[in-house]
Image (cartoon, rainbow, N blue to C red):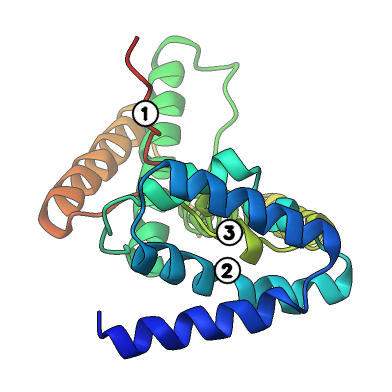
Amino acid sequence: MDPEIVRNYVAENRALEQELTKKNQQYIFDLKKSLAAANLSEEEKAVALHDMLPLLVQEQKTGRTARQLFGTVSERTEAILNKPEEVKETKPVFMWLDNALLILGVFGLMLGTMGLFFRNSVEVYGLITLFLMAGFGGWVFYLMYKYVYQYERPGADKSKRPKLWKILLILGGAFLAWVLIIGVSALIPPFINIILPPLGLVIVGGSALGIRYYLKKKYNIVGSLALPRADVPKK
């Protein structure tokens, strides 16, 4: 990095630190000591702090602390030292499709297989209901990733996580809409909402999982339910 840019970062960092509350100043002081102990260069420390301080100054106006935004000093140090490799983000439409095919595959196989052995004790869904269940469910699962799971990834910026009440409101509303759509679509007459025999459901479910596998390989889709695992320290 250009030395002039680094000097500007350092100057801006010092000015921003003066605006911090005493509690947040102590956090930054401890973080600097932790980064120094980890042998980070002055340039790396300047960049790391420059990524944090503008946000911290802004968010502390609402009462949020550095620890709430970035975790403990140890956690933030670990995140700075071990930045995960950048993975090409899967487009939302592919995440939705991956989820929908998974739901269609699982329910198709499950209902079809159970129907083969327990014909009179299995809930029967028409094709329209089954596809709506899968399609809308895929969207609900994507929302779970968008508002919850993506912030559990190693190195994720937890400061952008929505407030809990907003998450509960969105996901609760989406789940309720999902249940209502399944219930209403089940009322569609069977001559429109065609009910397949158990073997037909097995074929639909197996085909959905096969298509999902093909698309994941072809487009390198990372599903919304798949989270990168944090490395486990070796003993």
Q: Earlier in the sequence, mark 1 or mark 3?
A: 1
Residue at 29% across, 84% down: 3
Residue under circle 3? 143
Relative image position of residue 169 (x, y in whole percent): 81, 60
Residue at 65% across, 75% down: 55
**Label 1 amino acid?**
Leu
What's the mark number on residue 109? Answer: 1
Quadrant that contains the C terminus: top left
Asked whether disc 1 touches disc 3, contact meaning CB atoms under 8 Å apart, the reply is no
Question: Is 204 displayed left or right of 155 in the figure?
Answer: left
Residue under circle 2? 52
* Mark 3 and mark 2: Cα distance apart in space: 27 Å
For residue 119, say whether it is visible.
yes
Q: Secondary structure at mark 2?
A: helix
Quadrant that contains the N terminus: bottom left
**Label 2 amino acid?**
Met
Frontmost of labels 1 and 2 is 2
